[in-house]
Image: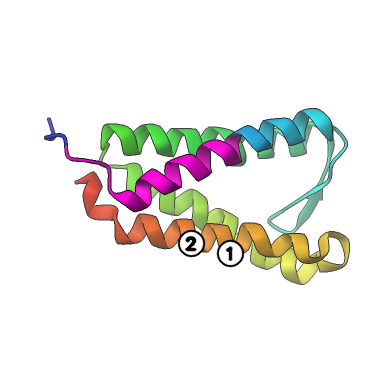
């Protein structure tokens, strides 16, 4: 069992941001039921889009937060993996769907890069 050590400051900030991100994703699902999303080169809507948003924008951040708070060894890899998926998806959408989503593509791209870098820099916390 790992000894408890205080949560690094960048993870405290990331915790707040990810909790807000997860909350906002639920609000988007509820208030914009017909919203289209870009996912790895596909333009999705309906139940498929809701499932993708639920998994990537709600379940994944909360699962990462749980792993972070419990200092689970797989937490850093999981956090970098799901943020890597966001980064890849944003780059693909930037080239394929910029005409549809406009500048809205940049926020998740920049946020995911920052999240990825924070997790990478603080990855030793999980060991």
Residue numbers of the magenta segment: 5-22
Q: Disc 2 vs disc 1: Cβ atoms closer than 8 Å?
A: yes
| Residue found at x 57% / y 38% | 20
Q: Position of residue 117 (x, y in %)?
A: 41, 63
* Residue 94 sits above or below residue 124 on the image: below
Q: Residue at x 22, y 53 (%)?
A: 124
**Image-based side of 98 in relation to 92, left or right:** right
Mark 2 secondary-structure assignment: helix
Q: Give the crowd class for mark 1: few <14, some 14-19, many >=20 residues within 10 Å.
A: some
Q: Position of residue 85 (x, y in %)?
A: 55, 54
Q: CA distance from mark 2 to mark 1?
A: 6 Å
- Disc 1 is placed on an element classified as helix
Is 125 positioned to the left or the right of 56 in the image?
Answer: left
For residue 69, side relative to residue 31 (left or right): left
In the rendered image, which quarter contains the N terminus? top left
According to the picture, the residue beneath numbered tag 1 turns out to be 110
Task: Identify the image's colour scheme: rainbow, by chain, secondary structure or one colour.
Answer: rainbow
Residue 114 is marked as 2
Which of the 4 image quadrants contains residue 110? bottom right
Q: What residue lies at 26% left-to-right and 37% top-to-bottom?
A: 71
Point out residue 116 in the picture as x, y percentages from the top left corner.
Answer: 44, 58
Q: Is residue 78 visible?
A: yes
Quadrant of the image occupied by residue 123: bottom left
* In the depicted structure, whether residue 73 falls above or below residue 83: above
Instruction: Confirm whether the magenta stretch covers residue 9.
Output: yes
Q: Position of residue 111 (x, y in %)?
A: 56, 58
Q: Residues within 10 Å of mark 2 (few under 14, many from 20)?
A: some
């Amino acid at each position: 069992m790992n000894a408890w050590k205080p949560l690094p400051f960048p993870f405290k900030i990331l915790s707040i941001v990810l909790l807000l991100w997860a909350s906002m994703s639920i609000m988007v699902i509820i208030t914009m039921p017909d919203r289209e999303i870009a996912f790895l080169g596909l333009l999705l809507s309906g139940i498929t889009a809701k499932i993708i948003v639920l998994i990537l924008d709600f379940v994944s951040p909360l699962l990462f937060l749980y792993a972070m708070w419990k200092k689970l060894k797989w937490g850093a890899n999981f956090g970098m993996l799901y943020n890597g998926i966001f980064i890849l998806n944003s780059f693909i959408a930037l080239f394929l769907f910029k005409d549809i989503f406009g500048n809205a593509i940049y926020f998740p791209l920049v946020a995911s890069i920052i999240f990825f870098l924070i997790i990478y820099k603080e990855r030793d916390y999980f060991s």
